[in-house]
Image (cartoon, grey):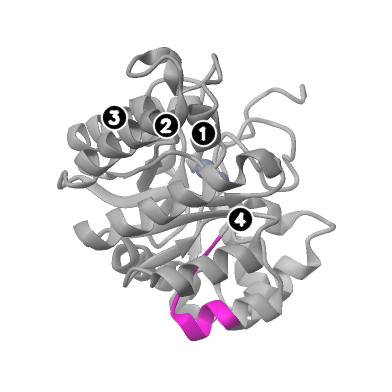
Amino acid sequence: MSRTEAPPLPEPLRVPVADSHTHLDMQDGTVEEGLARAAAVNVTTVVQVGCDVKGSRWAAETAAAHANVHAAVALHPNEAPRIVHGDPDGWSRQGAREGGGTAALHDALAEIDALAALPHVRGVGETGLDHFRTGPEGMAAQEESFRAHIEIAKRHGKALVIHDREAHADVLRILADAGAPERTVFHCYSGDADMARICADAGYFMSFAGNMTFKNAQPLRDALAVAPLELVLVETDAPFLTPAPYRGRPNAPYLIPVTLRAMAAVKGLDEDTLAEAIADNTARAFDY
Ligand SMILES: [Zn+2]
Ligand SMILES: [Zn+2]
């Protein structure tokens, strides 16, 4: 079997759950096909996440067209510095201000703010910090954008969806300093057990992706083990982070059962109990 071939449909879940974070616009096939494959294994709801102005508009439109799709809108932490520095491959090429600069960032944030007001938009994100892809020259723009998204989420009463890559301490510091929204989700949770205790105390949701199944991911499994059941979500972040044994092949929401079953083993729970908790938690996090 080719490494690029889509993995087979897993055994369906008995309890319907949501994929709390996916990128349908980066996956093969139509939205309808992706949703039908997911529904066939009882992944009945997805949160579609935008990473730039164009993707956020698409997320809002897709959520408006499908009852079981909810949208999150944002400038990705790696997108904000691109806008400011006028990267020709970034958002600035699509319009507003060709030269970039903070004025271009403010224009883009105003678009996100307008989208965040829409009823089908249930989250503001993914936003946060990415010290892995963005170097020191982009950090000021990244932090300014993160703080603006926190403010937008609070003003519209939407969930805040955090992207935290190798930036745990700074993300937690800025959240505490700015005041986190009532509902905050760490997407693709990547901290250890100590950080999970901090998140639990703050009431932050922790959403686990396919990488928790990877051989070298024991710290993630340790974090999941201590995360309170009522704060745990599951996601694909598809097309990225395909769970084992399909690592490297295309990911999609229909593969949620693979990750959920690995999570149930870590929690020492039967899969129905975990699925019921996750379904409830996701609806609470995104208020749908
Ligand atoms: Zn992310
Ligand atoms: Zn993502």
Residue 240 visible in the snapshot = yes
In the picture of the structure, the residue carrying the numbered disc 2 is: 52
Amino acid type at circle 2 is Asp
Amino acid type at circle 1 is Glu
Which segment did they paint magenta? 198-207
Query: Mark 4 or 2, which is nearer the eye?
Result: 2
In the picture of the structure, the residue carrying the numbered disc 3 is: 57
Name the mark on residue 259.
Answer: 4
x, y (%) of residue 174? 51, 66
N-terminal label among 1 and 2: 2
Query: Mark 3 or 4, which is nearer the eye?
Result: 3
Amino acid type at circle 4 is Thr
Establish if 65 lies above or below 141. above
Q: Are marks 4 and 1 in contact (CB under 8 Å)?
A: no
Residue 134 visible in the snapshot = no
In the picture of the structure, the residue carrying the numbered disc 1 is: 79
Establish if 27 lies above or below 41. above
- Tell me how far mark 4 sits from mark 2, CA to CA: 27 Å
Say whether residue 116 is magenta.
Answer: no
Q: Nearer the viewer, residue 217 or 152?
A: 152
Establish if 178 lies above or below 133. below
Name the mark on residue 227.
Answer: none
Amino acid type at circle 3 is Arg
- Tell me how far mark 3 sits from mark 2, CA to CA: 9 Å
- Tell me how far mark 4 sits from mark 1, CA to CA: 28 Å
